Image (spheres, helix red, strand yellow):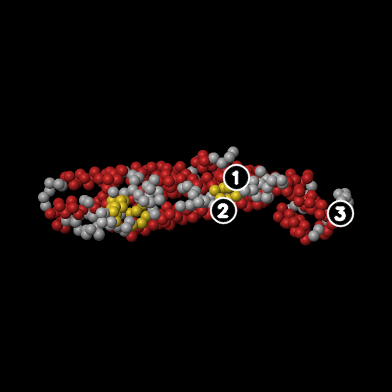
Amino acid sequence: MPACPEHRHMDEVAFSAHVRALAVAIRDRVAERTARTVLKDAERAREAVRIAMGTDDVTARVPADEGYSLLDEDWRALVDAYRDDYRIDLLSFRSSDAAEAEAGLRDRHLGWIVARFTRGRRLPQPGRTAPPIRSLEEIAGTGPLIEVRRSEGGEIDVGLASERLGDGMLGAAVVADVGGVAAATTGWESETSTRFRDEFLPRIPTAAGNQINVLRAMRNLLGLHQGLLTRAREDVDRIAHDGLEAIESHDDCCPGGADTFPTGLGLTTGVTALADGVARLTGGGTGITLLGDGGGPLEGHVDDARRLTAAGVVGHELGGPTPEVIVEKIMTALDTTYRELDRGYTEIGVNGLGALAKLMADNPDLLRAPRPSTEEGTSAATPGEPSDAAA
């Protein structure tokens, strides 16, 4: 079964079984082809003994050590390596021993191949992130709330795009409540009511907008999480499929798919830039910039985070002249994917959630609307220093 985009969306049990079956197949094919290589090496080693004896007679009597003492240093090193690493004596190995050697390689020596796929097998199903993303969209909406404007004189002004505040349930409630209060107090004629409408009410949408931006930033961080899982699953699946094909295509005539099975990695391409923009103060200091705020790399679309396109990836050629080389390339590709996955989550955690948490802790005045003081019926908060939370 070739690599298929649908594999990455399997549930955890199905994906784990799918990848494990591929890893087991790689292990078994390596054992089979390695046993065949052992037999060929054994035949060559015995030929080297006959050459050292000065005879072409395959029935000629060899020394008690099977001719080991007659071999040169390189051949002895090869024989020693087989004895030490696989408990196989090339000098006495025959075709009748190949099946046992294959079973020994498969059952005792190559289990680590399957084990190295374990982390990739256990990657959660990316689709499990969809429900919380939808919930955040329902509560907070999706579009960017921060608007960057340029005046006729060329000055940059950063402000709240109030017409987008009501996209979600939270913003809609704020807009309705603030509008209702403003309408109800329109007829009041007093300094207190004027200050209430001019100083207090207009600041509630700004604080609420910043809170909504935090929720939308969380939504996009979840989108990045989903994108990382999707790309990681895709890479693990592709490595397993292409690696198996490279092993199966290997024979003594044509080295296994050399330069024919490029596996595209680059899991975290763009993640640094995306996560870095998830939470920081805007230039005007009037709101919070979240991932995809108009000019950001996502343009407000969490789907782009989910896709995490692999632009600029470094390909891994899985073909090679021997099964050992192919396996080494498969493991290098796997390890690269795991490292990039870790790096991606570091970016999300440190530059995403970490930056967002620090922003909220360091700037509470951007997230809280003032509450009018009971003293003289006026607001006790100055424009830059709101008091207790009211929104």
Q: Amino acid at mark 2?
A: Asp
Number of other residues with Cα within 10 Å of mark 2, as a class: few under 14, some 14 to 19, many 20 or more = some
Task: Please give the residue where the numbered disc 1 appears in the rendered image.
Answer: 242
* x 24%, y 53%: residue: 203
Q: Amino acid at mark 1?
A: Asp
Alpha carbon separation for disc pair 3 and 1: 45 Å
Judging from the image, what secondary structure is the residue with disc 2 in? helix
Q: Position of residue 65 (x, y in %)?
A: 83, 56
* Marks 2, 1: nearer the viewer: 1
Alpha carbon separation for disc pair 2 and 1: 16 Å
Res 386 visible: yes
Task: Please give the residue where the numbered disc 2 appears in the rendered image.
Answer: 335
Q: Amino acid at mark 3?
A: Val
Number of other residues with Cα within 10 Å of mark 1, as a class: few under 14, some 14 to 19, many 20 or more = many
Q: Nearer the viewer, residue 283 or 150?
A: 150
In this rendering, would 252 be left or right of 60? Answer: left
Residue 96 against residue 68 in the figure, above or below:
above
Circles 2 and 1, Cβ within 8 Å, touching? The answer is no
* x 29%, y 52%: residue: 149
Task: Please give the residue where the numbered disc 3 appears in the rendered image.
Answer: 62
Quadrant into which the N terminus falls: top right
Q: Position of residue 167 (x, y in %)?
A: 31, 43
Earlier-in-chain disc, 2 versus 3: 3
Earlier-in-chain disc, 2 versus 1: 1
Q: Position of residue 173 (x, y in %)?
A: 27, 44
Judging from the image, what secondary structure is the residue with disc 3 in? loop
